[in-house]
């Protein structure tokens, strides 16, 4: 069973109101409320027994609170990604100094152009990493990622994608062979080996929950998913992340856990 000791988060910046969104009909995020929700998210992480490193907001990058996308941190190595959205690509330079606090230089790798990769497309299942081939993550990015991982004895499985922003927008591993799956991933045979919790369409946003040391953080307002997760025997914590949802961001996007 894996265990996390640390998380890294980045405070939302005022410019987040201009972040990328596919759902403008939800309205712009309210910055002050986003800060309060971010505080609660940090408290939820801490309640799971991990130490949280809080990085300063960066006004140059509206989406930079979605720190999951800029790195993949595993037990043996760290991979700085090459984010596929042009307005977000420079975020990769903001994370490297923080990563150096936890990893030897030799264990830090970078995805290089023309490869692109967003951390939101990477789902870790033990020593195997599922990687969504999305609008943000391309075949070359997955190839580079797979070859970095192979040197550490990890494997990599590419997951073709059609609609969702990131792989973990729709599928998340809860350990103990349990998997939350929504929409295009619900029937994907690549995930048949798992005990699947199928997420109903009206609660699709809650497919993005976070497992931390046997607690599941669940977004507030999704009672069916919450009930299913409780049924599996997990301790749960709910956090309202409505303001991040307006930018297509889920719970996992807001932290790097390792
Ligand atoms: C973006 O479009 O990049 C941000 N507005 C949302 C990123 C969400 N990140 C994630 O799913 N890992």
Image (cartoon, helix red, strand yellow):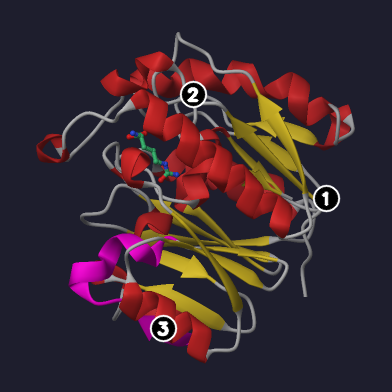
The residue tagged 2 is: 113
Q: Quadrant of ligand 1?
A: top left
| Residue drawn 90% across the image and 33% down it | 104
Viewer-proximal residue among 164 and 156: 164
Asked if residue 255 can be seen in this view, the reply is no
* Quadrant in which residue 156 is drawn: bottom right
In the image, the segment drawn in magenta is 192-208
- Does label 1 or label 2 sit earlier along the sequence? 1
- Residue 130 falls left or right of residue 19: right
Q: CA distance from mark 1 to mark 2?
A: 24 Å
Q: CA distance from mark 3 to mark 1?
A: 35 Å
The residue tagged 1 is: 76
- Residue 24 falls left or right of residue 101: left
Closest to the camera, between mark 1 and mark 2, is 1
Ligand 1 within 8 Å of disc 2? The answer is no
Quick one: SS at disc 1? loop
Q: Which residue occupies the extreme right position in the image? A: 104
| Residue drawn 23% across the image and 34% down it | 21
Quick one: SS at disc 2? loop
Magenta run includes residue 226: no
Closest to the camera, between mark 3 and mark 2, is 3
Q: At which x and y percent is residue 150? A: 71, 55
Residue 227, disc: 3
Quick one: SS at disc 3? helix
Magenta run includes residue 207: yes
Residue 252, disc: none
- Does label 3 or label 1 sit earlier along the sequence? 1
């Amino acid at each position: 069973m894996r265990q996390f000791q640390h998380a890294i988060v980045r405070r939302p910046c005022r410019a987040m109101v201009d972040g990328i969104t596919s759902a403008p009909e939800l309205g712009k995020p309210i910055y002050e409320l986003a800060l309060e929700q971010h505080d609660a998210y940090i408290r939820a992480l801490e309640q799971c027994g991990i130490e949280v490193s809080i990085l300063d907001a960066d006004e140059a990058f509206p989406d930079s609170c979605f720190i999951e996308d800029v790195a993949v941190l595993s037990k043996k190595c760290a991979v700085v990604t090459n984010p596929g959205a042009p307005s977000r690509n420079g975020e990769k330079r903001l994370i490297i100094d923080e990563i150096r606090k936890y990893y030897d230089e030799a264990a830090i790798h970078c995805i290089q152009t023309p490869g692109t990769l967003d951390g939101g497309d990477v789902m870790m299942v033990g020593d195997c990493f599922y990687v969504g081939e999305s609008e943000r993550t391309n075949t070359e990015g997955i190839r580079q990622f797979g070859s970095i991982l192979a040197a550490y004895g990890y494997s990599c499985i590419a997951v073709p994608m059609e609609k969702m922003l990131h792989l973990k927008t729709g599928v998340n591993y809860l350990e103990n062979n349990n998997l939350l799956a929504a929409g295009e991933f619900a029937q994907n045979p690549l995930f048949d080996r798992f005990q699947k919790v199928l997420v109903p369409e009206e609660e699709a946003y809650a497919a993005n929950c976070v497992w931390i040391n046997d607690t599941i953080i669940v977004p507030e307002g999704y009672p069916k998913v919450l009930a299913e997760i409780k049924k599996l025997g997990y301790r749960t914590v709910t956090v309202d992340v409505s303001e991040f949802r307006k930018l297509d961001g889920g719970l996992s996007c807001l932290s790097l856990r390792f």
